């Protein structure tokens, strides 16, 4: 197409104040734009003032779309303004159900599903494993609160539909994002409650009988290490009592690799339900990963000419084939790539030729959220389709249950166990 769509990337990198024009023409990057306002770096990404400054000065064309940011708390900062200004915003990792509130976030969408969907998968896993008690330790930010509420809602819906069966009891234990002391208190409270899950097995089965601790941990970064250390110290995670520790998608392999000693051993066998992005069964993803290492150096140099110094790509950036096999590429970058593609495709739908209209935000949103005849395309994360709230339709999501296991070399490796089918509300093992 001949027109141009102007997009800004909202990222959480602390790169200081800078503005670079962003243009996506015919789905090919020409320039990237990042804005962090003021004299100080912004750890939470662009603020309202930052985005307003970007829109008010320094650019000769209007802004049509925002890709990102990652964390839900960041999106909740910027989405009210993009909505008020009728600018489409597509995140690839912000999963809080709160962002489905279209009164406060009228132009916010995402290529990943809301945690309202993953709550149902968590509860179904517990039910299929015959667990009747679940403890949820969660960080009290937008991400953690939304995740915990989704699980509670799903548990309540399950209990209402199955009144003749054993009821699922779920108790939550919040902690502050920056407080190891609050994590310790949450673990202590869990220890005091700590009901026994009877899985229904025969008493002679299993080394320790039929009881199991059932814990869902929702957090990230240093919180993971603090949780495991406190849980081992408080006797919540011990060798003599089996435990199902379900980790949220905020926990990375990098977080687990930081664990040492008994805490590291306790994390061996942890499970997680993930919205898997790039899959080898998807030819578009296979092509993307295959072509990565054949990217010519001239392309890298052309990209670097358009990037601030802090974003410069190293000389061997496209030589690292292992990057394409990482969770960062598969479960983050793939969703971001589809967010960029979605905005480009919406631009083509709204204006097949010529410049985009001033009401592109409204027209693009109407197209994206039209559940009967709206935007639908095959991307690097599979079939991409949106619901009426602008979130990835859960029926096109790729939710899988994985084990995190220590291999022979002592490194954590991910092993797929089952896929969750939203249509049937069951795991396919």
Image: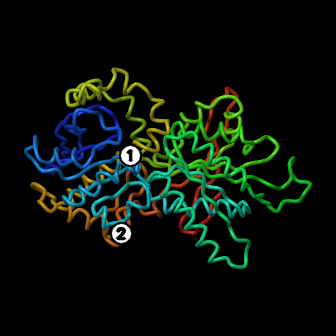
Report whether 29 appears left or right of 91.
left
Q: Earlier in the sequence, mark 2 or mark 1?
A: 1
Q: What residue does disc 1 label? A: 70
The quarter holding residue 114 reads: bottom left
Q: List x then y, in percent, for residue 46.
A: 28, 44
For the residue carrying disc 2, how many other residues have a C-alpha within 10 Å: few (<14), some (14-19), or many (20+)? some
**Looking at the figure, which quarter contains the C terminus?**
bottom right
Marks 2/1 in contact by CB < 8 Å: the verdict is no
Q: List x then y, in percent, for residue 11.
A: 32, 41
Q: How is the image coloured?
A: rainbow
Residue at 62%, 46% (x, y): give it: 185
Task: Give 332 or 421, whichever is nearer the viewer.
Answer: 332
Q: What residue does disc 2 label? A: 388
Q: List x then y, in percent, for residue 178.
A: 49, 40
Q: CA distance from mark 2 to mark 1?
A: 21 Å
Q: List x then y, in percent, for residue 55.
A: 15, 48
Residue at 74%, 63% (x, y): give it: 130
């Amino acid at each position: 197409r001949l027109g141009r769509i102007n997009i800004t990337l909202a990222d959480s990198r602390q790169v200081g104040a800078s503005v670079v024009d962003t243009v996506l023409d015919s789905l090919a990057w020409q320039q990237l734009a990042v804005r962090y306002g003021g004299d100080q770096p912004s750890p939470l990404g662009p603020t309202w003032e930052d985005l307003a400054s970007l829109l008010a000065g320094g650019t000769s064309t209007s802004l049509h779309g925002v890709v990102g940011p990652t964390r839900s708390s960041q999106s909740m900062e910027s989405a009210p303004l993009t909505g008020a200004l009728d600018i489409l915003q597509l995140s690839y990792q912000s999963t809080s159900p709160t962002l489905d509130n279209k009164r406060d976030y009228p132009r916010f969408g995402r290529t990943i599903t809301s945690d309202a969907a993953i709550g149902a998968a968590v509860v179904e896993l517990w039910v299929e494993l015959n667990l009747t008690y679940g403890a949820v330790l969660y960080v009290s930010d937008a991400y953690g609160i939304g995740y915990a509420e989704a699980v509670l809602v799903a548990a309540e819906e399950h209990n209402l539909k199955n009144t003749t069966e054993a009821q699922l009891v779920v108790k939550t234990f919040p902690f502050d994002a920056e407080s190891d002391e609050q994590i310790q208190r949450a673990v202590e409270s869990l220890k005091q409650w700590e009901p026994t899950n009877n899985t229904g097995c025969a008493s002679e089965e299993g080394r320790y009988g039929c009881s199991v601790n059932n814990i869902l941990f929702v957090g990230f970064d240093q919180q993971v290490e603090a949780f495991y250390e406190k849980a081992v110290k408080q006797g919540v995670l011990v060798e003599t009592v089996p435990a199902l520790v379900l980790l949220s998608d905020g926990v990375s392999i990098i977080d687990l690799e930081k664990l040492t000693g008994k805490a590291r051993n306790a994390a061996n066998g942890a499970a997680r339900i993930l919205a898997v992005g790039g899959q080898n069964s998807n030819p578009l993803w296979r092509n993307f990963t295959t072509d990565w290492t054949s990217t010519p150096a001239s392309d890298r140099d052309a990209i670097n000419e358009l990037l601030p110094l802090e974003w410069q790509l190293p000389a061997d950036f496209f030589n690292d084939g292992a990057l394409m096999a990482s969770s960062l590429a598969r479960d983050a970058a793939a969703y971001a790539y589809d967010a960029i593609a979605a905005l480009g495709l919406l631009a083509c739908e709204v204006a097949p030729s010529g410049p985009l209209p001033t009401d592109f935000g409204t027209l693009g949103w109407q197209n994206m959220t039209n559940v009967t005849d709206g935007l639908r395309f095959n991307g690097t994360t599979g079939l991409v389709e949106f619901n009426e709230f602008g979130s990835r339709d859960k029926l096109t999501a790729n939710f899988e249950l994985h084990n995190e296991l220590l291999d022979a070399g002592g490194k954590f490796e991910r092993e797929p166990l089952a896929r969750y089918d939203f249509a049937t509300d069951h795991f396919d093992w």
